[in-house]
Image (cartoon, rainbow, N blue to C red):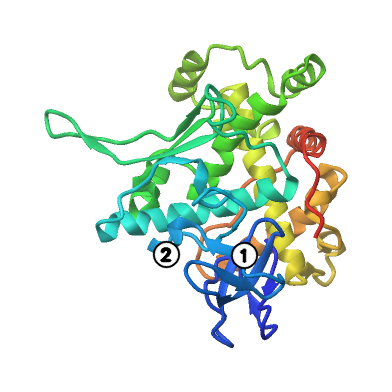
């Protein structure tokens, strides 16, 4: 994620900022230019962006609930921004808990769409593809006839990504993480994993690409329900870490692809953040742990370039976390087979889109 600056005073501003803390300017993110804009009111719902000659932008309709800070050009007929317009079922906003959940979910969703827009990946919605277009449902838990809680499910099916809204609550999400013995569980992780399933359907289509994918991840036609049941009964293979990014990735080829897709987005976006802040590692007497992000991670020619910078940085991040008594930020190992999978995803993305010129 880039570090931005206020268009009025030059003060550093972040992707989530609504107001510049230095000059008080209203801020909004304009996906058309992938830029944070300092704004001046121009009457009605229109705003004048500092970098544009006309007052021709307005906020996403979800800004009314402090859920979204993205802008829309007046020549766009949608009332929702390029991320929010894909939403179908959303949390209620008539109570503090529902609103807080929606705000956290919306934040994670915008980080996801930042990456999709940077790569210019295809994002057909249900208007373009009624059967398999992208759409999101953020679902509330239910109570059955006997008064028992029935948690909503997080998953993907034919372009529909469902997310359990209750996981926006830290205590709920952490309890699930502990019960499932997971090292990592976040809203953004859910988004990046489930969108991986969507892009398998979008991008792994021709015979050559499908054959390469199956050689790396396995045959996705293997019975899914049976594979998951076997994983829950027997656990992962003893040598799973030599071949997979996570234990869940070992359960089925489709989950292996989605997990690798999610980690690829984690790595690329975090490296861009490190680059924006000028972070580098050069520990004394440990030359092999030296790294500098002197390239645009969204344009990396191959996954090895990313990994060579990521491993030293992630080790440093984990060490800093431990110094604060916190769990590791990235408790995963990138084995050679995993790097091959990440490289396939990098090539897949590079073929499918064109990185936004900035």
Residue at the spot of label 1: 56
* Residue 283 drawn at (x, y percent): 80, 70
Question: 205 or 305, which is in the foreground?
Answer: 205
Quarter of the picture holding the C terminus: bottom right
Looking at the rendered structure, the secondary structure element under dot 2 is: loop
Q: Going by the image, does 54 lie left or right of 292? A: left
* Residue 186 drawn at (x, y percent): 49, 50
CB of mark 1 within 8 Å of CB of mark 2? no
| Residue 27 in view in this figure | yes
Q: Earlier in the sequence, mark 1 or mark 2?
A: 1
Question: 57 or 144, which is in the foreground?
Answer: 57
Mark identifier at residue 66:
2
Q: Residue at x 75, y 24 (%)?
A: 216
- Few, some or many C-alpha atoms within 10 Å of disc 2 (few <14, some 14-19, many ≥20)? some
Q: Which of the 4 image quarters holds residue 345?
A: top right
Quarter of the picture holding the N terminus: bottom right
Whole-angstrom CA distance, mark 1 to mark 2, is: 21 Å
| Residue 239 in view in this figure | no
């Amino acid at each position: 994620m880039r570090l931005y600056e206020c268009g009025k005073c030059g003060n550093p501003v972040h992707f989530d900022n609504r107001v510049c803390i230095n000059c008080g300017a209203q801020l909004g993110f304009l996906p058309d230019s992938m830029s944070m804009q300092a704004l001046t009111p121009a009457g009605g719902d229109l705003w004048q962006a500092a970098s544009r000659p006309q007052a021709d932008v307005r906020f996403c309709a979800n800004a009314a609930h402090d859920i979204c800070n993205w802008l829309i050009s007046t020549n766009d007929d949608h009332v929702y921004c390029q991320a929010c317009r894909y939403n179908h079922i959303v949390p209620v906003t008539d109570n503090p808990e529902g609103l807080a959940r929606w705000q956290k979910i919306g934040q994670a969703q915008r980080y996801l769409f930042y990456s999709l827009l940077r790569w210019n990946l295809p994002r057909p919605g249900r208007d373009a593809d009624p059967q398999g277009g992208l759409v999101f449902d953020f679902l509330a838990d239910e109570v059955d006839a006997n008064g028992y809680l029935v948690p909503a499910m997080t998953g993907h099916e034919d372009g529909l990504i469902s997310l359990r809204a209750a996981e926006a609550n830290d205590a709920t999400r952490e309890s699930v993480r502990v019960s499932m013995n997971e090292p990592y569980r976040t809203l953004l992780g859910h988004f990046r994993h489930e969108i991986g399933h969507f892009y398998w359907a979008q991008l792994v289509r021709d015979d050559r690409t499908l054959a390469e994918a199956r050689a790396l991840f396995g045959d996705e036609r293997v019975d899914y329900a049976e594979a998951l049941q076997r994983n829950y009964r027997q656990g992962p293979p003893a040598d799973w870490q030599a071949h997979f990014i996570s234990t869940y990735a070992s359960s089925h080829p489709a989950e292996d692809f989605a997990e690798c897709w999610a980690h690829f987005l984690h790595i690329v976006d975090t490296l861009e953040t490190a680059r924006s802040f000028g972070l580098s590692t050069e520990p004394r007497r440990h030359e092999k742990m030296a790294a500098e992000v002197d390239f645009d991670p969204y344009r990396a020619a191959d996954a090895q370039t990313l990994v060579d910078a990521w491993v030293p940085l992630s080790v440093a991040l984990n060490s800093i976390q431990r110094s604060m008594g916190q769990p590791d930020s990235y408790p995963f190992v990138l084995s050679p087979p995993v790097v091959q999978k990440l490289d396939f995803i990098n090539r897949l993305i590079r073929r499918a889109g064109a990185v936004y010129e900035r």
